[in-house]
Each structure stands twice: as C-alpha cells, then as structure tokens.
Image (cartoon, rainbow, N blue to C red):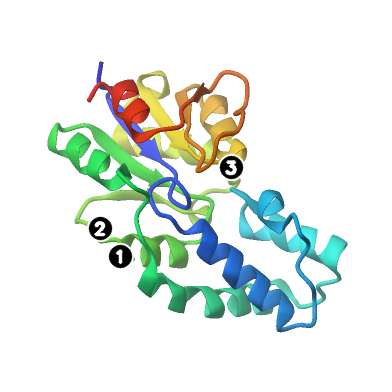
Amino acid sequence: MTPKAVFWDMDGTLTDSEPLHDIALATALRSLGITPPADLHERVLGVAAWPVYEMLRQDCGLDLPFDDWIQRKYDHYLPLTKGLMPRLGAIEIFKELRARGVAQAVVSNSDRLIVDANLNAVGLSYPGMHTISRNDVREGKPSAEPFLRAAWLADVDPSDCVAIDDSRTGASAGLAAGMKTIFWPERPMEGPPGAVNLNTIEELRAELGL
C-alpha cells in the first residue's frame, strides 16, 4: 500500500552526490597539506558538516575556523554539481508518488546551499516543494528532528510516513521519528535494527506500493 507521506534523504539517496562530496572533501584537505584518511568516506557518510569538522580537527589536525573550512570545501564542491546525476530510478519514483498525490519532502543533513544546488542540478525543484536542510533544525540526523519537521510540514502523523535514507545515520533518524524506515544504501550493507533493508530499485518500488 502506498504510504501517506515519503521523506527522502538527498545525498546518495535521490542524488549520486556522495562521490562529489568525497572529492571536494579530499581536495580541500590536500589544499591544506593534510592527507585524507583511507576510511574518510565511511566516517563522514550521512554526517552533518559540524561533526565532520570536529572529527577532522581531532584526527587530522585541521586548524581552520569552521566558517573558513566549510567555505573552502564548498568552493571545491559547487563546481562539481554541473556533472551531478540522480541516483538511478529514485527521481522517477519521486515524480510518480507526486503524481499520485503523496506528500513528500527532502530531508538532508547538508546545508541549505548544498540542498538547493543539488536539487536544481538534477531538475528536482518546484513551487511548494518541502526541503529540510541542516540549517532548518536545531539537531541534525541521527536526531529525529529533521524527519519530524517534515511530517509537521506535511501535516501527516509520523507513524503514517516512510523515511528513505542511504546512511545508517539517516536511517537511525527515521526510526527515532517513529517512521517506517527504508535503508537503501548505494552498496549492500546492514542497516540499523528496525529498518527495512533494500538493495534494488525494484525492491524500493514494491515497498512503496508502486
């Protein structure tokens, strides 16, 4: 059965932007003479900018003020969005759900600048579209707050909503919000207990009643 509302993570779920974030992050670090750790992708997947910054300060010796650091990272990231692609099949599902009148929102741990740039790059932006960035809430994922804000904006009880995320951090937030949570990683891995683990676009369509 199709749910009343579906809330999508952005990076890695609707858009194939995680590789671009990896490139921008590594390039920004190297521009400061810092060698990116080999497991950088795994350590930052789904994590908001401030916790990533704190990790880099503690573990990699980053000593720039946060505002200077994030500007440097975004200066490397934004030009890359010209080549940004949607995740295969995801935006088609988004549009099909919209045509059926299902409430939807994009719920991201990225800053507003990145949310708007990514969605514009893949042509997923329209009047009245709800998007929640890290700047719109007090606490980002894994807190429930971003998904709960989406439910409030959609005027749908959280228990009637589905959250879709490719990171354990994001899936944990959906579960904390009391939503049915679909863990749809870009490569097979185990999600948090309680999430529905899916690996293919066909499985996702079936789970959403399409």
Assess whether mark 1 and mark 2 are in contact (beta carbons under 8 angstroms). yes
Judge the density around disc 2: few (<14), some (14-19), many (≥20) Cα neighbours within 10 Å.
Answer: some
Residue drawn at point x = 66 percent, y = 55 percent? 41
Q: Which mark sits nearer the N-terminus, 2 or 1?
A: 1
Instruction: From the viewer's side, name the closer residue of 139 and 109.
Output: 109
Choose mark 1 or mark 3, whichever is in front: 1
| Vertical arrangement, residue 160 with respect to residue 145, above or below | above
> Which residue in the protein does label 1 denote?
120
Judge the density around disc 3: few (<14), some (14-19), many (≥20) Cα neighbours within 10 Å.
Answer: many
Q: Which mark sits nearer the N-terminus, 1 or 3?
A: 1
Q: Which amino acid type is shown beneath numbered disc 3?
A: Lys
Residue found farthest to the left:
99
The reply, left or right, for residue 66 in relation to residue 148 is right
Badge 1 marks a residue whose secondary structure is helix
Judge the density around disc 1: few (<14), some (14-19), many (≥20) Cα neighbours within 10 Å.
Answer: some
| Vertical arrangement, residue 71 with respect to residue 131, above or below | below
* Cα gap from disc 1 to disc 3, whole angstroms: 23 Å
> Which residue in the protein does label 3 denote?
141
